[in-house]
Amino acid sequence: MNQPVKSLPGRPRSAEADQAILQATLDLLAEAGYQSMSIEAIAARAGVGKTTIYRRYTSKEELVADALGSLKQELPIPDTGTLWGDIEILTEHATKTILTPLGRQTLALIISTASSNPQFAKVYWKKYMQPRSAFFAVLKRAQERGEIKENVDIELIYDLMSGSFWHSFIFKPESEPVADHVRRVLSLLLEGIGACSNPK
Amino acid sequence: MNQPVKSLPGRPRSAEADQAILQATLDLLAEAGYQSMSIEAIAARAGVGKTTIYRRYTSKEELVADALGSLKQELPIPDTGTLWGDIEILTEHATKTILTPLGRQTLALIISTASSNPQFAKVYWKKYMQPRSAFFAVLKRAQERGEIKENVDIELIYDLMSGSFWHSFIFKPESEPVADHVRRVLSLLLEGIGACSNPK
Amino acid sequence: MNQPVKSLPGRPRSAEADQAILQATLDLLAEAGYQSMSIEAIAARAGVGKTTIYRRYTSKEELVADALGSLKQELPIPDTGTLWGDIEILTEHATKTILTPLGRQTLALIISTASSNPQFAKVYWKKYMQPRSAFFAVLKRAQERGEIKENVDIELIYDLMSGSFWHSFIFKPESEPVADHVRRVLSLLLEGIGACSNPK
Amino acid sequence: MNQPVKSLPGRPRSAEADQAILQATLDLLAEAGYQSMSIEAIAARAGVGKTTIYRRYTSKEELVADALGSLKQELPIPDTGTLWGDIEILTEHATKTILTPLGRQTLALIISTASSNPQFAKVYWKKYMQPRSAFFAVLKRAQERGEIKENVDIELIYDLMSGSFWHSFIFKPESEPVADHVRRVLSLLLEGIGACSNPK
DNA sequence: TGCTAATCGAGACGGTACGTCAAGTCTTAAG
DNA sequence: CTTAAGACTTGACGTACCGTCTCGATTAGCA
C-alpha cells in the first residue's frame, strides 16, 4: 500500500500562512464586509504576500468559502422531552450564531450569491445551516411523541420556520425578540389558521 | 401669495438625462448585476457624463434605489371570492415579478444591503414588496368570510408565507413549481400541524 | 448723419463686469500664475458668471493679453545729458516693473508663448517692452553726442543689452544687483573686448 | 565586506518601462508641448500603466526633467585656431539643438518654469546650456592667443552673447540667419561701441 | 553536502474604475 | 440681448485594487 499523500518536491506550503490567511479573512469579513474587503488588505493583515493567497484560491469567493468552512461549530441535538423545549434551545443557538457581525455578513453573502453563484451559496449555506439536521431530528421526535400530525411534511415545516425567521430577522431587526417571534410562529403552526380545520 | 415652487437660478436639470440614467441603471443592473456594474458604464450607456450622475447621486446605492423606485407597478387587489383563488393570483403575479433578471438582482440587493445599510434595504423592500398591502387585504377578506380564524395575527401569516416563499425560491430554485409550493404551504397553515389542536 | 455708434438693442454690457474681470485676472495671474489660473476662479473672484467672460474672450490668452494691456504705464524719456545717466534711469524703471510678481509672470508668459503663439507673444511683448522706444531715443542721442560710434547698429545694441539683462535676471536672480550688472555690460560694450580694436 | 549595492526586496523596476516612458515623454513634448501633454497619453504611448509612471515621478515636471536629462549630448570643444572659427562651430551646434521642436519646447519650459520652480529650471538649463563650458574654453583660448583683452570678464561675454542669441531667436525668428546675427554681435563686441574708447 | 524545486515575502507590472476638477457650451429666469 | 447661476459633455487627474509577474531568500527531500 503506497502512501495516499505523496510528498511533493520543493518547499511545502506554510501551515502558518494558511491559518493567518483564514483568520485575516474572517476578521476583515466581519469588520468591513465582503465587498469592501480587498485581497491586498487580507494579505497585509495576514502578513503574507498576495501570491501566497492567489496560489491557494482563485477567487475571493473561494477564499471566503474556505474561511467560513474552517469555523468549527458543534451543535448537540437537544432532547428536553418536548417540542417547545427543544425549539427553545435551537432558537437560542441560532440567534447566537446569527447576531454577530460575521453571522450577518455570512447571511448577506449566502443570499447575494445565491442567484449568481449557486455552487458557492451552497457551501456557505451548508455551514450556516448546520442546525438543519438537528431541527429535523427534533421535529421527527415530536412527531413520534404525537405532538405533530403524522402526515405533515417536515421539510415544509422547516421551510416555514426558517423562512419566517429570516424574514423577520432581515426586515424587522428592531422589533420583538427573536425568541418571542419563533414562539408565536410555532404556536400558529400548531393550531393552524383555518377556522374549520378541526377534523372533529 | 408666493409661489410654492421656487424656481432655482441656473439651468434646470435635464429630465431626459434623468430618464436615461435610470433606464441605463436598470438595464445594467439586470445584465451585469450590482457589483459588476460601473458608474462609468452607466454613464456611457445613458450617453451622459459621469459628472451628471455624481451631481444627482452620491453613491451607487442611492442611484440604484432611485432607479428601482422609479419602476411603476400596478397590482389590482384580486377578489375571486375565495382565499385560494386570490392567493393563486397573487402568487402568479409575484412569480412574474421575481423571475426576471431584474427581480433576482433586486432580491440579492435587498438582502445583501439589509444588514449594512438598512435605510437602503427599506427602499428596495418597499418597491419589491408592494404586493404586501394586496396580500393583507386578501387575508382580511378571507377572515371576514370566515375562512381564517378571527384571532389570528395576519402579519404573522404574511411573514410565514412570504418567508417560506423566499426560502424555497432561493435555495431550491430547481424544485417543484412555485405555485405548488405556495399551495402546500397554505394548506398546511390552514389545517395546522398540531395533532391535538382542536380548539375547544 | 447717423450716429457712428449704433446703440444696440437689449441690455448693454456692464462696464463694472469688464473692470472686475480684468482686475481679477491680474490678481490671479500674480498670485497663482498663468497655468494654475482657472477661468472659473477668475469668474468667482470677479463675482461674475463664466458666460460673461466667454462672451468677451475666446481664450485665456486673449483675456490675459487684454488684462495686461489695460495696465497703464507712462515712461518719460530720460534726458540727463549723458548715456550713463539715462541708462541708469531706464534700468531703475525696468527693474521696478519686472521685480513684481506680475512682472515675473508676464515675462514667463511672453517667452513660453513666444514659440507656440507668436501673435500673443507680440501683444505681451509690446506692453512689456514699452521702454524700447525710450531706449532707442537714449542711444540715438548718445550717438549724436558722440558717445557711441556712428556706424554701430543701435538695434543690435538693444538686443545685446536687453538679452543679457534677461539672461542674468532669469538664471542668476540671486547674484549682484541688476543695476551693477547693467553697468558692467555697458562698460564692456563701450570699450569692446578686442585686444587690438583701437583704431589708433 | 558587504555589498555597496543593497538589492531591494520585491520585483525590480523594469528598465524597459523606464526607457519607454522617457522616450514617450520626449516624443509628446516635441509634438504637443508641455501643457497639452497628458500623463495618460504618455502612458498610452509608452505602452505602460499610469501607475508605472506615478511610481517613478510625482509630477509632470519631474518626469520631463528626467526625460530631458536623459538626452545624451556630446559636444567636442572646437579648436580651429581662431575665435571666429570656434564660435562658428559652436553657433552651428547651438542652432541645430535649438531649432528642433524639442529644443523650442525645452526653451519655453526653461523660462516658464524659471520664475516659479527654479530648481527645475536649473535642471533643464543645465542640459540645455551644456555648451557653456565649451564656450568658456573657446573664449579662454582666444584670450591666451591675444584675441580678447586680458582684463575682460569672460562670464559677462557669455551672458551677452547667449542673451542676445535668445533675444533675437525668440522675438525675431523670421529675420536674418542666426549665424549672421552672431557674427554681427561678435564683431560689435570685439570692436566696442564707444567712440573714444582707446584704452591707454 | 550539495542539488532541485516549490514556496515565501515583497513589490513592480498593465489595467480598470474610482470620484474630483476644470474646460467650454448650453439653458433658464431676471434685468 | 446681457446678466448670474448653474447644468451639460468631455477628458485628465491621481488613487486604489485587480490578478500576474519577477526578484532574492527559504526550506524541504533526494542524491
Image (cartoon, coloured by chain):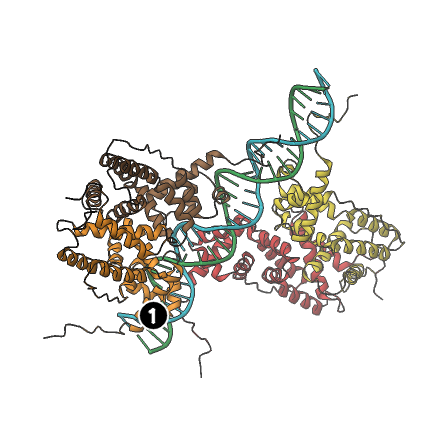
Chain colours: A yellow, B red, C orange, D brown, E green, F cyan
On screen, residue B168 versus residue D127, left or right, reads: right
Where residue B74 appears, x then y in whole percent?
Answer: 54, 63
Q: Secondary structure at mark 1?
A: helix
Q: Nearer the viewer, residue C98 or D8?
A: C98
Q: Nearer the viewer, residue A29 or C27?
A: C27
Amino acid, disc 1: Ala
Taking the image as drawn, is residue C15 in sight? yes
Residue at 14%, 58% (x, y): give it. Answer: C145
Where residue A173 appears, x then y in whole percent?
Answer: 70, 62
Q: Where's the C terminus of chain B, which quadrant?
A: bottom right
Chain hosting mark 1: C
Vertical position of residue F1 compared to residue D170: above or below:
below
Vertical position of residue D33 compared to residue C23: above or below:
above
Residue furthest left as drawn: C1
Residue beneath disc 1: C20
On screen, residue D81 versus residue D64, left or right, reads: left
Vertical position of residue A57 compared to residue C165: above or below:
above
Where residue D87 appears, x then y in whole percent?
Answer: 25, 37
Instruction: Identify the image quadrant of residue D31.
Output: top left
Q: Nearer the viewer, residue A194 or B28?
A: B28
Instruction: Identify the image quadrant of residue A178.
Output: bottom right
Where residue C65 appears, x then y in whole percent?
Answer: 28, 60
